Image: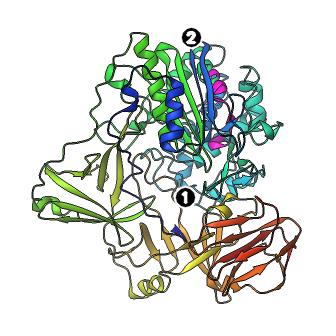
């Protein structure tokens, strides 16, 4: 499944190669680094802080809050997945109070938690926090909204889970999962008798004096939130705030200073958590089940992404890290408990890799200044030597590899090249260096193939992301080889009839960010070169696709099964809790009156000729316009109503409450 506009990715992510490391100039300051992020890397605003021995020693902010004003240290940012550390702290608080046993099943505390897979009874509370639960709940449908704290995501979570299967057996493998932390949020509420926001206020924010840490359910002035970019980052304006309503997963707002104060208390305030609880969160949870032998990225603790961050681990300094990305915010939190120091970076207009790199550089500088760390001797990248021929035993690694981004064709050629394609689009070439090691032409990525004990073959990628500050080096299992599966001619014909068709989203709430992320639609691309698959999804029957990937770490995260069904000759697609309809839901736009019907479905319109329209909306809703490339160029939730000059080939969407009407003139 992909958005209407093709999403073509490189082998891992944006890999930045800079001629020299900017931060090797020893006279540079944190402010210099922040300016560098904005001027060289395109970040819109950044806020950062350092806490040491219990005191905030650095706190600053730079960049634009909106088109006309600067950000500040008092404005709150969405912290994204750093919220998971707060969920972990809340669970551990209840453990310390004797109210939760991490090794007991979730059903002990949430007796109405059920799934369409009996293995759910084996999911423990600890598994929710270390990503080993096997849950597939990856949909954030109706969750990321403009200035709307609708709670339906968590309100309906148990109902959604009741119809889902597990992707892997509980404890079998650690694969990043958002749904586990939302289920942990429910555990906290059931055990404590408080809403999750009330629990945070009672046990964390108020006792620790965190006055600038809130959730979408808190009472606070939204003017204290930093402004966000809109229209895929093309325009900066005073837009409604991003509200991520999966609070335990990623919905908390905070400042860099408050993050530092929180994590300082997490590790050093013995009235907050016991040492036993703290130690549990920093143990190597990633070794639960399937894992490789090399140091990998995302070596999970409880709630933490990394418990031994590079390059600190090479000098026997334990640094824990957690980062987060929402649609508009990015965040990073690093802590070195043995030296009582932590760094937080929050930003808009960038990504969490930039934040981690900046935070890491500040931490390195501080530890070097204290004489407990030497300047790291980075080995950036890999030597690109003359390619060598590929032996026959390696050629068997050619084939289809799936991950959360799609299905990649790996084509190994005997003379020494590995060509990679996504949806028939060429992505990259790697060159065999001998011993089964392949590097890209820049020497920034090294790829190997590895079979794990579950019998599956994986592509493993070592990548260097050099922002100019602290390099971010990581090793990930990037793709799982998909083995051919025989299917009947009838099943094959059913899927061939769907390839290259577009299905249009019908039931997303009108305040959703999805409407400004591109045309709310999805397409099934052409037939997979390996029989039995549609993209990276396994064909189960003529109407069902399963996400059966089990990639340790990150790249099979939040999988979703797809189910197609037919009602009165109209085909629908169910993806998580999202409902899509076939092309019969798209009608030519004409002047007149339209109304959201009793089913609540959004209305999609094609525009066959250039036209200018004025739209009068009566009721709650939005209308959004998309250009020929599927990019949102107007959304009524973001801008005042105005006449729209529409080019032929564009699309228009109406979404709103039942009964909302639109008069098109």
User: In the rendered image, is residue 602 in sight?
Assistant: no
Residue bearing the label numbered 1: 117
Q: Residue furthest right?
A: 618
Label 2 to label 1: alpha-carbon separation: 48 Å
Q: Earlier in the sequence, mark 2 or mark 1?
A: 2
Image quadrant in which you'd find residue 598: bottom right
Residue 463: horizontal and vertical position, in percent? Answer: 33, 44
Residue 195 to residue 619: above or below: above
Majority secondary structure of magenta residues: helix
- What colouring method underlies this structural image? rainbow
Image quadrant in which you'd find residue 258: top right
Residue at 53% x, 65% y: name it.
561
Pick whichever, 471 or 186, lies toward us.
471
Residue bearing the label numbered 2: 53
Give the SS element for disc 2: loop
Residue 177 to residue 355: above or below: below
State the extent of the magenta-drawn residues as a range: 248-261
Magenta stretch encompasses residue 476: no
Residue 204: horizontal and vertical position, in percent? Answer: 71, 25
């Amino acid at each position: 499944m992909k958005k209407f506009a093709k999403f073509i990715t490189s082998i891992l992510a944006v890999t930045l190669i800079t001629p020299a490391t900017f931060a090797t100039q020893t006279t540079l300051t944190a402010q210099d680094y922040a300016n560098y992020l904005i001027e060289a890397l395109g970040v819109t605003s950044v806020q950062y802080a350092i806490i040491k021995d219990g005191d905030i020693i650095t706190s600053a902010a730079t960049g634009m809050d909106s088109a006309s004003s600067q950000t500040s240290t008092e404005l709150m940012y969405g912290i994204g997945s750093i919220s998971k550390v707060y969920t972990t702290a809340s669970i551990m608080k209840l453990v310390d109070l004797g109210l939760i046993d991490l090794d007991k099943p979730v059903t002990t505390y949430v007796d109405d938690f059920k799934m369409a897979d009996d293995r759910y009874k084996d999911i423990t509370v600890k598994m929710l926090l270390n990503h080993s639960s096997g849950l597939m709940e990856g949909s954030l449908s109706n969750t990321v909204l403009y200035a709307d704290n609708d709670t339906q995501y968590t309100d309906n979570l148990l109902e959604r889970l009741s119809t889902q299967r597990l992707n892997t057996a509980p404890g079998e493998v650690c694969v990043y999962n958002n749904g586990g932390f939302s289920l942990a949020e429910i555990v906290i509420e059931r055990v404590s008798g408080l809403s999750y926001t009330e629990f945070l206020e009672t046990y964390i924010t108020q006792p620790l004096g965190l006055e600038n840490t809130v959730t979408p359910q808190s009472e606070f002035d939204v003017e204290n939130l930093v402004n966000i970019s809109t229209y895929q980052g093309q325009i900066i304006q005073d837009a409604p705030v991003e509200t991520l309503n999966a609070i335990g997963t990623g919905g908390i707002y905070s400042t860099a200073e408050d993050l530092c104060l929180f994590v300082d208390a997490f590790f050093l305030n013995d009235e907050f958590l016991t040492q036993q609880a703290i130690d549990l969160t920093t143990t190597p949870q990633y070794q639960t089940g399937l894992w490789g032998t090399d140091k990998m990225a995302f070596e999970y603790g409880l709630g933490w992404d990394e418990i031994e961050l590079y390059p600190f681990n090479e000098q026997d300094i334990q640094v824990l890290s957690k980062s987060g990305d929402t649609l508009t915010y990015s965040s990073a939190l690093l802590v070195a408990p043995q030296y009582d120091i932590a760094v937080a970076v929050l930003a808009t207009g960038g990504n969490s890799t930039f934040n981690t790199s900046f935070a890491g550089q500040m931490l390195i500088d501080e530890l070097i200044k204290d004489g407990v760390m030497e300047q790291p001797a980075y080995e950036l990248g890999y030597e690109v030597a003359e390619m060598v021929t590929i032996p026959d035993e390696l050629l068997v690694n050619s084939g289809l590899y799936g991950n959360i981004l799609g299905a990649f064709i790996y084509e190994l050629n005997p003379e020494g090249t590995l060509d990679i394609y996504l949806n028939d689009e060429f992505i990259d070439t790697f060159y065999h260096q001998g011993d089964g090691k392949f590097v890209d032409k820049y020497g920034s990525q090294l790829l190997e193939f590895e079979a794990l004990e579950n019998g599956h073959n994986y592509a493993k990628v070592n990548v260097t992301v050099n922002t100019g500050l602290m390099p971010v080096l990581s090793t990930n299992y990037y793709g799982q080889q998909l083995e051919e599966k025989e299917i009947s001619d009838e099943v094959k014909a059913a899927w061939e009839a769907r390839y290259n068709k577009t299905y249009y989203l019908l039931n997303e709430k009108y305040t959703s960010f999805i409407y400004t992320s591109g045309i709310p639609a999805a397409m099934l691309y052409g037939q997979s070169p390996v029989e039995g698959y549609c993209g990276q999804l396994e064909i189960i029957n003529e109407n069902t696709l399963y996400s059966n990937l089990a990639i340790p770490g990150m790249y099979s995260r939040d999988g979703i099964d797809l189910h197609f069904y037919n009602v009165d000759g109209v085909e629908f697609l169910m993806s998580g809790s999202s409902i899509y309809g076939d092309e019969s839901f798209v009608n030519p736009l004409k002047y007149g009156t339209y109304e959201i019907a009793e089913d609540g479905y959004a209305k999609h319109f094609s525009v066959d000729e250039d036209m200018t329209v004025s739209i009068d909306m009566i009721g709650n809703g939005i209308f959004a316009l998309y250009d020929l490339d599927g990019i949102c160029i107007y959304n009524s939730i973001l801008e005042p109503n105005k006449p729209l000059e529409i080019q032929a080939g564009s699309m228009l969407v109406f979404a709103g409450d039942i009964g909302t009407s639109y008069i098109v003139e």
